[in-house]
Amino acid sequence: MKIIPTNSLVGAFVEDIDLSCPIESTETDELLSAWHKHGALFFKNQNLDNEQQIAAASIFGEPVPFDFAPATAESEIVHKIANEKGRGIKSGTSTWHTDATWLEMPPRGTMLQAVELPSSGGDTLFASMSAAFSSLSSETQSFIDGLTAVHHGGSKLKKSADSISKIIPEEAVSHPVVRTHPVTREKCIFVNRLFTKKINELNDIENEAVLPMLCDLVLRPELQFRFTWEEGDIAVWDNRSVQHYATPDYSEARIMHRVILAGDPVE
Ligand code: SIN
C-alpha cells in the first residue's frame, strides 16, 4: 500500500490497496494515521458493494444510520446522494460545509463512493480547517479561540427531511468556533456557511463582520484540493478538520453512496 499526499494542504491518494478484501491491522493503523494527518483519503477504482463499503468505512470509525438522507434499499447505513439538478442550481451540498454540524455530536467522518457520474463535472472540493486556523494572525486566533457558535439545519435540512418523513431537531446546538482535533490536537475552524447561524458571544454588528470572514476562509484555493471522480472511486474525509463542497456544474445524474461515521464530542 502506498500513501501519496496531494500537492495541496489536504488529502492523500492511497494506491495498491483493494478495499473489498480484509485489510491487515498494520495497514488499518497506517490508514487511520494518514487520515488524521491528511484529512481526506482517496481510493481509485474500488467498486464496493454495500457490505464492503461499510467494512471499509469501519477502519475510520463506527458506521451508523443517518436519518436525514434516504438509505439504499438494501442497507440502513449506506445511503444515496442523488443529485440531478441543472447546472448552477445549488443544493445544500454545494455550499461549503461540514456534515450535520446541527447535531450535538456531528459525524466524525464521511465515506462517499461514486456510483453513477455525469459525463463531466461533479467534482468535490475539500479544504483544511487546521490550515485555515493557522493562516490567521495570533491576535485573531486568540480572539476566536473560546467563542461558541449556533448551528441549525434550517430550511435546507427541513426540505430533505420532509422528503423522507424524518423528524428534524428543533433545537439549535452550540459548538466551539475553534475545535481541537481529538487525535492530532490541531486547532480547526469549526463554523460553516451552511449551518452556522451566529457566534453567541458577539453582538449582531460584530456577527455580520466576523462570522462570514471565518466561514469564507474555506474559499482560499491554497487551503483546497479538488477531487475529480471516476465511477467506483472512494473518498473518506475527517469532518473534524475538513470542509467540503460538491460542484453543481452538470445536468446528468450523479449518484453517490455515503456512509456516515458516528460523531465524537466537539471540544
Ligand atoms: C456531501 O456533502 O456529503 C456530498 C458531497 C458530494 O456529493 O460530493
Image (cartoon, rainbow, N blue to C red):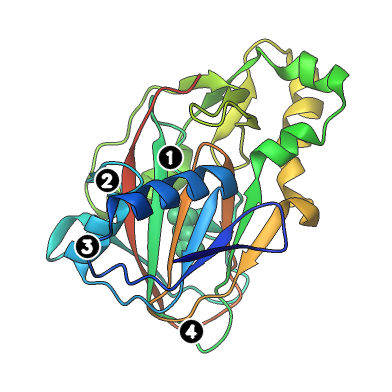
Kindly report which numbered mark, 2 or 3, lies closer to the viewer in this rendering.
3
Q: What element carries label 2?
A: loop
Residue contact between numbered discs 2 and 4, judged by CB atoms under 8 Å = no
* Image quarter in which the N terminus is found: bottom left
What amino acid type is highlighted by mark number 4? Pro
Left or right of 123? Residue 8 is right
Callouts 2 and 1 close, C-beta under 8 Å:
yes
Residue lying at 24% horizontally and 53% vertically, measured from the top left = 164
Q: Nearer the viewer, residue 68 or 126?
A: 126
Q: Position of residue 84 (x, y in %)?
A: 44, 75
Residue where numbered disc 2 is placed = 66
Q: Which amino acid does label 1 sit on?
A: Ala
> Counting residues from the N terminus, which is met first, the one under dot 2 or under dot 1?
2
Q: Name the residue under label 4.
A: 118
Residue 145 lies, with reference to residue 36, above or below; the image says above
Distance of label 2 from label 3 (alpha carbons): 25 Å
User: Nearer the observer, disc 3 or disc 4?
Assistant: 3
* Left or right of residue 155: residue 150: right
Compared to residue 226, the image places residue 175 above or below, namely: above
Question: Which residue in the protein does label 1 denote?
Answer: 100
Q: Which of 105 and 52 is in front in this view?
A: 52
Q: Distance between the residues labelled 3 and 4?
A: 31 Å
**Residue in front for this viewpoint, 170 or 81:** 81
- The residue positioned 47% from the left and 84% from the top of the image is 252
